[in-house]
Image (cartoon, coloured by chain):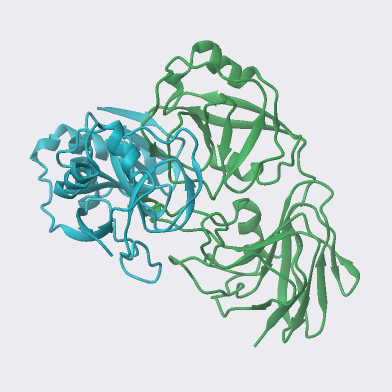
Chain colours: A cyan, B green
Amino acid sequence: MRLLPAGRTAVLVELDDAGQRRRLHHALSDHPADGTVDLVPAQTTVLIQVESADLLPGAVAHIQDLLSGGLDAVEERAREPIPVSVRYDGLDLSDVAELLEVTTDELVKRHTDQLWTVEFAGFMPGFGYMSGSDWPYRIPRRSSPRTRIPPGSIALADGFTGAYPQASPGGWQIIGTTDAKLWDEKADPPALLLPGAVITFEAVTS
Amino acid sequence: MTYFVVEMAGPRTLIEDAGRRGWAHLGISGCGAWDRRAYQQGARLVGNTAGLGCLEVLLGPIRLKCVGGPVLLAVTGADAQVDLNGSPRPSGRGFLVTDGQTVTVGVPATGLRSYVSITGGISATPTFASVSADPTRGMGPASLKTGDILPIGDGLAGVIATEPVDVAPASQELVLHGVWGPRDDWFTSAGQRSLEETTWRVGEASDRVGTRLVGPSLERAVTGELTSEPVVRGAIQVPTSGVPLIFGPDHPTTGGYPVIGVIDPDDADRLAQARAGVVVRFAMSHSDV
């Protein structure tokens, strides 16, 4: 665990693993440092941005307090899984299966057998980076990125599954499509894939 | 009711305010006026208290016709010529605009972005508690076009500052102060030295997402891939090319390339006025964190 400077008004906390990061994020969500403007999780890091430079030392002391109490005492919240229907018809499905030396049916089975946790958002509003409860694969990005990945695409890269709320260029490997409303800026919350949410994918044919 | 009709929209004029805060964890960028100092100066000159909408005018020219009024208007930021019905008005000072009059903001002699502030603020439908345009994500109001109507809101007016704001020519050479990290240790000491010793230039491909620099490639000590991590406005990110870019207000909320340092908020404001070719130097220090 390390505290890394990120300018005059922010600090980046680097944790040993995603579990520790989730615990620190929970602890800071429940007990924010004074003057917190943004609290942003990523895979093994959390960024705390405060209103002004004079509030940063206080925020750093607050984080050190939380960490000295031991993050293991912070319980990870149990969440009810949200089912998301997917048509496994993605352009890269058979290429990915071949890469992993499994059949496409086996790949779909592996993908639908997992509990996926939204670790963090980023890249575009509502795009969630999800890690699987028992997903051993690290999938390389496509060697040449696509200029347009259609909205609703379910895709794989590194150890993550992602879902595209809007059309975008991208190098992730597309395995399927969902009609689920991933992003609605008028809704509260606006994103289906909120950091911390647990997702299960269900295969559908139409 | 007072409104302005856009008679000439300029190449890119955006409605911006103090930006979106507290949504970065959902991938929503801060946005808002890039030159926050100029934005705040404009707000004070017209007596706007809260984070109300103004126009961020990239390289003019724009022409707005007033319907209704009278209303107080001020132009700050880049040193563009301002006219009311064809007669010059000083920049950096509020003036009244009445029904039927037209205001023009010309192409600035130096700098890039002029800010038009009007008492009550320019109203638009807020997205995540802000009227800021985010063209990169297609969020918020669209960029201005001819014929648009800009309604003036009834935002709370406060004290009007009567001291004029100095609208100086934008600097052709910027020294950007900042702190090292979070990933300065991903660069060799030669790479770190090169950041401070190089005379960088602002590249053509710069926009509100980031200011791309032109210069040498910074030598890496760690060559592996970085797991995506949160980034802030003013972050100096070093992509695969090794040539740094500095994130502006519309930056992505997470990024997968190492950030060697972060420039101070005031210096990030000054970058809003840096045209392609402007010289940039870095003066970095170590943070206490």
Place of residue A43 in the rendered image (x, y in percent of width and height, measured from the top left): 29, 38
Q: Which residue is rendered at x = 57% and y = 46% of the image?
A: B209
Residue at the spot x=49%, y=40% of the render?
A145
Above or below, comparing residue B20 to residue B172 in the picture: below
Query: Which residue occupies 71% across, 41% down?
Result: B274
Residue B158, image x, y percentages: 57, 72
Residue A173, located in which quarter of the rendered image? top left
Residue B176 located left or right of residue A205: right
Q: Nearer the viewer, residue A183 or B201?
A: A183
Name the quarter where the C terminus of chain B is drawn: top left
Left or right, residue B123 beside residue B90: left
**Which residue, as the protein is rendered here, is positioned at the far right?**
B87
Q: Residue at x 50, y 12 (%)?
A: B189
The reply to whether residue A58 is in sight is no
In the picture shown, does residue B84 fall above or below A60? Answer: below
Q: Estimate the x, y position of residue B48 in percent, counting from the top left.
A: 59, 69
Placement of B225 over or under B160, stated as above or below? above
- How far from the left and from the top, in percent, is residue A122? 39, 47
- The image quadrant of residue B9 is bottom right
Q: Is residue B190 left or right of residue A106?
A: right
Viewer-proximal residue, B192 or B81?
A: B192
- Front position in the image: A147 or A93: A93
Quarter that holds the N terminus of chain B: bottom right
Q: What is the total number of numbered labels drawn onto the structure image?
A: 0
Question: Is A140 left or right of B274, judged from the image as shown?
Answer: left
- The answer to which image quadrant residue B267 occupies is top right
